[in-house]
Amino acid sequence: MGNLNLDILRKYANIFGTGLLKETTPKIAQGFINQLFHQWHVDTDMVTQYVQSNQSLWDKMAPDTRNQLGVLAERVGDLDFITPELFITGIKKDFPGVASLFLNWPEAGEWLTMQIDELKAGVSETQ
């Protein structure tokens, strides 16, 4: 009887844990993106140059960062929650000029979408 109760608790803990993880992951991802932008000292000039030269962010990411994204994808199940909107929301407070570029310059918005698609494909390949 004691084992049955423990099994039920584990079942609900796993359900709650998975749901909680899926709910909090977008906020964690936004913080991660913001941290990368600070680490890379991103500014509007840099983004303009990257967009104009079609520079890949995936290529710029360190192997550790790529691995962290792979672990996140394994735990969450996929990275479909990462969208241009999530990305922009994650940076708009600390990088308002860059967020504005993505929102108001169509080429920058397209570049951002391509970067997110490349990131998702890269993470899938590493799993």
Image (spheres, grey):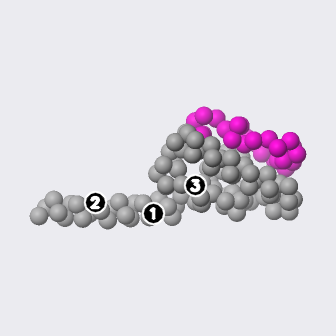
Q: Residue 19, percent across and down?
A: 44, 64
**Between marks 3 and 1 in the image, the one whose residue lies nearer the viewer:** 3
Q: What separation in Å lies between label 3 and label 1 (alpha carbons)?
A: 16 Å
- Residue range (magenta): 39-66
Residue sitting at x 26%, y 63%: 9
- The residue type indicated by label 3 comes to Leu
Magenta residue check for 41: yes
Instruction: Report the quarter where the N terminus lies.
Output: bottom left
Looking at the image, can residue 64 be seen?
Answer: yes
Sequence-earlier tag: 2 or 3: 2
Badge 2 density bin: few <14, some 14–19, many ≥20, Cα 10 Å: few
Taking depth in this image into account, of 92 and 74 the one nearest to the observer is 74
**SS category of the residue bearing label 2:** helix
Q: Position of residue 54 (x, y in %)?
A: 82, 44
Tell me the element at label 1.
helix
Residue at 58% across / 41% down in the picture?
Answer: 125
Query: In the picture provided, is 12 more to the left or to the right than 65?
Result: left
For this view, does 68 lie left or right of residue 84?
A: left
Kindly identify which residue carries mark 1: 20
